[in-house]
Image (cartoon, rainbow, N blue to C red):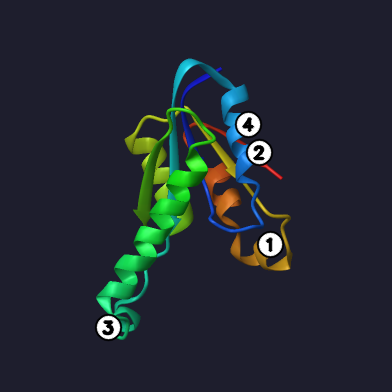
Amino acid sequence: MYKNILVPVLLDKEHDTAASYEVAQAISEDGAKFHVIHVMETIPSYATTQIPQEILDHTRQEAAEEMNASAKALPGAETHLVSGHAGRAILDYADKHGCDCIVLASHRPGMEDFFLGSTAARVVRHAKCSVHVIR
């Protein structure tokens, strides 16, 4: 069983966040620590100069609120909004916080994933801890 579990979430309808939370609880030890994160991809600077700061701030606040509401299904979970490339940010967060397991949802792979690779595939290949992928 695991003591320090990272659950990255996407704030969309295609990924089963509830299933990720259920699996995280099922594989955790009593008193385990849960981290729920959402990664916001970095917007290139040439684009952010065209977007008012209030809109960027509002978008970030909405994402944080949605993630916090979602994470209530996982008692005692800490929530963090992270910026960067999703795969790299998940791996970096897990390393920095000493996570012993990552539980993440994944879509069914398509042809583009064979050439570019999905976030889940990157995490599975490069994580230093166990990874449980939910489909």
Query: How many tags in the picture?
Result: 4
- Residue 108, given in percent of the width and then of the height, sits at 73, 55
Find numbered disc 4 in the image and state the secondary structure of the residue it sits on: helix
Which residue in the protein does label 4 denote? 22
Which residue in the protein does label 1 denote? 114
- Residue 57, given in percent of the width and then of the height, sits at 30, 66
- Residue 40, given in percent of the width and then of the height, sits at 41, 60
Disc 1 or 3, which lies upstream in sequence? 3
- Which of the two discs, 1 and 2, sits closer to the camera? 2
- Residue at far bottom of view: 50
Q: Which label was assigned to residue 62?
A: none
Disc 1 or 4, which lies upstream in sequence? 4
- Which of the two discs, 3 and 4, sits closer to the camera? 4
**Where the C terminus falls, by quadrant?**
top right
Q: CA distance from mark 1 to mark 2?
A: 25 Å
Q: CA distance from mark 3 to mark 4?
A: 41 Å
Which residue in the protein does label 3 denote? 49
**Residue sitting at x 43%, y 28%:** 76
- Residue 112, given in percent of the width and then of the height, sits at 67, 68
Whether residues under marks 4 and 2 lie with C-beta atoms below 8 angstroms apart, the answer is yes
Find numbered disc 1 in the image and state the secondary structure of the residue it sits on: helix
Which amino acid, mark 2? Ala
Q: Which label was assigned to residue 19?
A: 2
**Where the N terminus falls, by quadrant?**
top right
18 left or right, relative to 77: right
Whether residues under marks 1 and 3 lie with C-beta atoms below 8 angstroms apart, the answer is no
**Residue 108 shows in this picture:** yes
